[in-house]
Image: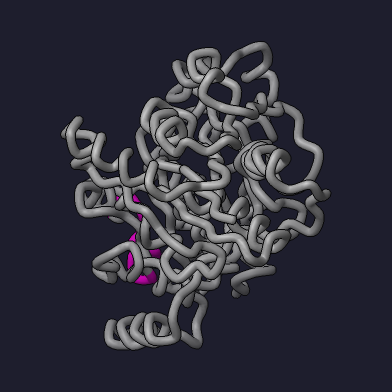
Amino acid sequence: MKILVVQQKMIGDVLLSTVICEQLKKHLPKVEIHYVINEQTLAVVKHHPAIDKIILFTPKYKKSKLAFYQFLKSISKENYDAVIDVYCKLESNLISLFSRSKTKVSYHKWYSKFIYSHTFSYSSKTESTMGLAIENRLLLLRPVLDTELTAVEPPKIFLTEAEKDSAKQYLKKNDIDLKKPLIMIGLLGSGPDKSYPLKYMAEVIDQIADESDATMLFNYIPKQIEEAKALYTLCKPATRAQIKFDVFAASLRDFLAVLYHCNALIGNEGGAINMAKALEVPTFAIFSPWINKEAWHTFRGTSDHIGIHIKDYLPEKLTGKNKKELKQITPRLYELFKPAFFKEDLQIFLKLKVGTH
């Protein structure tokens, strides 16, 4: 049996969707699983034992209709027994259609429902500590697996021992004492509407420095360096002494290997938080006001992973507003969401996972 799983989205989505591959392998040990993902997300699924073949969707397929058509023809030749389309957008709709599989599964959309043999509507109510983002993915397995899904494991990232050792040597070379706590700071989200204000993030980082002797690393990409410098400047001089600003991973895979050696990741909810969880690194996630915490605070319920949201403290500010409305007022909501609200939560997290003075 050969199954195609399609998820051409961002890193966090691609990583979370590996639970589908894992469950398929668990219940159908002889199944061959192919996974279509965007090229830039390869790092988080590389060496994954539940994936037999990774099919990269490259930028040229978006730019060239001919290249995309040739890609679709290659999919047709694979003779898949089932396709699970987690992405459910035009590109993945066409991939599903060209697969010629009798069993095609995705989410219910009025414009594409005719393509699929089975469709499911997103659930808006969580029934477990896994989070809606996981639960809604598992829905797509129903037409393929005739069994109850129990003891679902969180997604995992698989690093080689060589990668781990290389990162360890890199940290030592940069005078980082691995006997002391090491914290990765997720200083920015994927956009302004998912990024806690820098002036508030500086207060959070100052609290970490005040309460622990942890060394801190900044997680940012090259185009964000000016914002990273601005945040560094906003921190107190004593705090800056604990930040290794120039310790920067050259690639996503290198970042994962460095993150593996951290005691915690603290910062904006997003891909980095999901990657830390997949490496079993404790996380303290600050959610954007418009993001659904019930969906993306996955595998909650333990002290290892804390998620804080403005609605935890000021629920009345969100009452009666839909996602679109919340997006529009996110800057104002962020201004209201001051670090003082969760200072005690962070203090407890630091004491349990990092150690304090």
* Vertical arrangement, residue 163 with respect to residue 98, above or below: below
Determine the main secondary structure of the stretch shown in magenta.
Answer: helix
Quarter occupied by residue 205: bottom left
The answer to whether residue 95 is visible is yes
The answer to whether residue 268 is visible is no
- Where residue 242 appears, as percent x and y from the top left, is 38, 71
* Vertical arrangement, residue 7 with respect to residue 272, above or below: above
- Residues 171 and 8: in front is 8
- Where residue 62 appears, as percent x and y from the top left, is 23, 34
* Vertical arrangement, residue 294 with respect to residue 303, above or below: above
Q: Residue at left 62%, top 54%?
A: 19
- Residues 53 and 199: in front is 53
Q: Residue at left 47%, top 47%?
A: 79
Q: How is the image coloured?
A: one colour
Q: Residue at left 40%, top 41%?
A: 8
Magenta range is: 233-242
Is 239 inside the magenta-drawn segment? yes
Pick the quarter of the image with the C terminus: bottom right
- Residues 133 and 180: in front is 133
- Where residue 317 appears, as percent x and y from the top left, is 63, 19
Quarter occupied by residue 120: top right
Q: Total number of numbered labels?
A: 0
Is 236 inside the magenta-drawn segment? yes
Quarter occupied by residue 355: bottom right
Q: Residue at left 69%, top 52%?
A: 299
- Residues 318 and 345: in front is 318
- Where residue 137 appears, as percent x and y from the top left, is 63, 41
* Vertical arrangement, residue 159 with respect to residue 71, above or below: below
Pick the quarter of the image with the N terminus: bottom right
